[in-house]
Image (cartoon, rainbow, N blue to C red):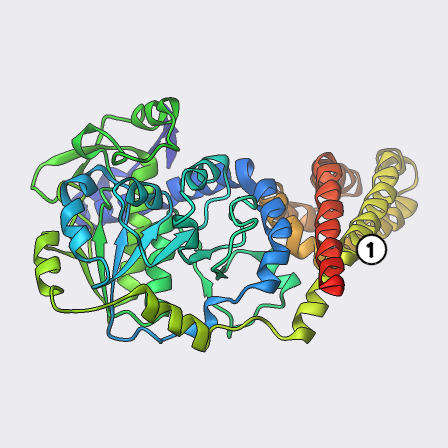
Amino acid sequence: MMKANGDTAIIVIPVYDRIDPSRRVEFSDDAIQAAENYANERRVYQVMGMQWTKNILFNFPANISTPSLRGLKGRLSDQTAVIVGAGPSLEQDIEQLRRLENRAFIIAAGSSSQVLNHFQIKPHLIVTMDGGEANLQAFEYLNTLEKQIPILYIPQIEYRIIQERSHLMHAYFENDSISRYFMELSSDDPIFASSHSVTGTAIQAAAYMGCTEIVFAGQDLSFAYGTLYAAGANHVSKELGDQTAAHGGMTVNNVKGTVNATSQSLLLTLSNIEELIAQYREIRFINTTAMGAVINGTEWQPLKEIADRFESKTFTSEYLEDLFKQYLGVYSKERVEAAKQRVLQLSEDLMLIENLLFRISKKFSKLSELSRTNQSKCVKLMQEIVSNWDIVVSNQVYSSLFTMVYYNEQKRFIREIPELEVENNIIKKAVLLTEVLGGYIKAIQVKLPELKDIAVEARERVVAMMTMESVG
């Protein structure tokens, strides 16, 4: 497999096309998808790794003072969830969606809350997870009334979104190593697979709460009608829209039997949603999007038919609020206090790691010369370096924070370790240790000052919270 003009390409031995061309095509498609997912993951962590870390730590006071979704597990059995996206097809169905108010459980997926606000439709729940500036802009547009809508958030969300908001609850992503450490997460906590889009998170939340039918509205997942968002999505800049559209030339089948323009990012999102759908065989999925992409694993129905079916049913905000009051609860005092102490200790832990890294770095300068002049001393020095490094990696702060902040650097380091381990030539091993471990340590040291600043502010936020608790 190789990259051709920035795209993933497959090189195939001709005999495989003759033996079983269909399997070759299937394998090629899967391989390309895996390669694109990997490349996308690297890009996302490169841009968002530090921001997610900042958000998770700054959101810590909210996490320990609001309930998780745990209490609602299975409480909406046999209910239908309508997961609303911000796609342009939503405008075609807005009156049918209005008919479903207080009849079905309406979940606004991320920025669709802005679109629903524009059309004066109030969802029962907003699900949000994005950690970037655009998501903050989306929520700044909500009026005072909309701020009373319950929000289910993932801790990596842009921290300013949930500041000074009530009606909050949360769940976690399985790749959130930071919350896993600080909150001591277990299988009892609501932990979801990380998803390419907030729709994927909303699907898992609805399934977790026990919904047996999930209806998609406004989930175009493509450039239906030549655009990506419905009216009211004010957080999307023209520049961002143009950049997304610039990946054009790609198409995807739509529900009308023709095709829509799409992009690699949208195709990855669609594929991720389809993978999630395949995991919930007990749930019926219906795609009502008027002009959106075909979503494998769903059946298509016009939203009018759904609205007709729910004409005599009731699902009110008051009913949901009663469930919240009855079943949602905050964490135990013991768990909260233990979590606070970990955050308060974080700055000291980072200082310890920083000092160890500095000591290790100083040793590298001697390796090259010793490998040629005194190999027994060189071996001893390499053992000291590895011993000090073992102390670093055994620190839980390393395995939690560093996994997210240094995701790409850590992946590269892990890939290069085997070559280092099997090398027996002392001179070559000294060079490899300097390049592999020394290079990784340098990469860590570049970002460490910013991480230390985040830890200091996270501590200040917890201290401020504790001060308010003692006064109140």
Residue bearing the label numbered 1: 387
Secondary element at image label 1: helix
> Residue at position x 50%, y 66% from top?
68
Amino acid type, mark 1: Ser
| Quarter location, residue 87 | top left
> Residue at position x 62%, y 65% from top?
183
Where 461 falls versus 248 (above or below)?
Answer: below
Q: Position of residue 128 (x, y in %)?
A: 43, 50
Quadrant (top left/top right/bottom left/bottom right) for the N terminus: top left
Q: Position of residue 94 (x, y in %)?
A: 18, 45
Residue 364 as seen in the image, left or right of residue 108: right
| Quarter location, residue 205 | bottom left
Q: Is residue 410 visible?
A: no
| Quarter location, residue 180 | bottom right
> Residue at position x 53%, y 50% from top?
162
Q: Nearer the viewer, residue 205 or 169?
A: 169
Quadrant (top left/top right/bottom left/bottom right) for the C terminus: bottom right
Q: Nearer the viewer, residue 405 or 242?
A: 242
